[in-house]
Amino acid sequence: MLASKFSTNELKPVSARKTVHDLVYEQLRDALMSGAFEARKPFTIASLSERFHTSHMPVREALRRLASENALSISASGTAYVPAITVPELRDITLARTIVEGATARIAGPLLTPADIATLEELLDHHRASASAGSNTEMTAANRAFHFHIYRAAGSSVLLSQIENLWLRSGPYVRFLSDRMTDLLKTDRASGFTDQHAAMVAAIRQGDWDGLGKACEADIRASQDLLLDILAREDGTSEAS
């Protein structure tokens, strides 16, 4: 399916010797962005090296690089792990995302072509179908593909890099929500998961770039509100503080 190529839960062996470090880093970064790893999940260099078919060095360097981007934390013993979920950081990341992604969507709007719109509509249809089928992985992939198709159209490598970093830091929250999505899809909330994507497509078709930005921001805030609601219902969870 269209969005399947964006799913990054599977780590693949690395064979290109000249760019081993970059390939290991890119795969780990992509997996973290997709919520492939749980909060507080430790990374064992030996096990990752075995999965990538590499020596320890490129894995160690990739983990250090990701830690410098705040995607991972390093314990006193030197072990890398996915940061814990906290409500203050969730709110902070959401604030930053609404500012940066909303602005980028407004810039991208006038640059989107009919072919882009067709792709976005196809991704929206795939997102809806995945929600109906209860496919968490496909939903996550379609959501990411939809947003980044718009952001790339803005033509700003700086903005895109900032957005990627924010999504990277959102990884634990994506995983937390994904782990609960099967039950959520059985509730009356299931039909609303694609509402803002539909509003974004409608705004693009109408040439309403401010409306596009506002729908993008509303989509981000809706995810935050859903997470906050789950955290509250789970009595803050043992992971949140």
Image (spheres, grey):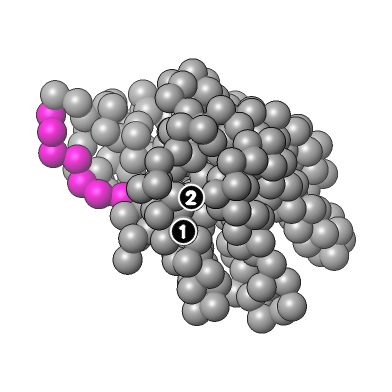
Say what amino acid the circle numbered 2 marks. Phe
Residue 179 percent coordinates (x, y): 60, 64
Q: Residue at x 47, y 67 (%)?
A: 125
Q: Residue at x 14, y 24 (%)?
A: 18
Q: Give the SS element for disc 2.
A: helix
The residue wearing badge 2 is 146
Q: Nearer the viewer, residue 86 or 60?
A: 86
Q: Is residue 231 magenta?
A: no
Q: Residues within 10 Å of mark 2 (few under 14, many from 20)?
A: many
Q: Main secondary structure of the magenta part?
A: loop
- Give the tally of numbered discs: 2
Q: Give the SS element for disc 1.
A: helix
> Mark 2 to mark 1: distance in Å?
9 Å
Q: Residue at x 46, y 21 (%)?
A: 156
Q: Please indicate, yes or no, whether residue 172 appears anywhere in the rendered image.
A: no
- Horizontal arrangement in the rendering, residue 165 relative to residue 187 (left or right): left
Bounds of the magenta span?
11-17
Residue 93 percent coordinates (x, y): 70, 34
Q: Nearer the viewer, mark 2 or mark 1?
A: 1
Say what amino acid the circle numbered 1 marks. Glu
Residue 229 percent coordinates (x, y): 82, 59
Residue 121 image label = 1
Residue 234: name its quadrant.
bottom right
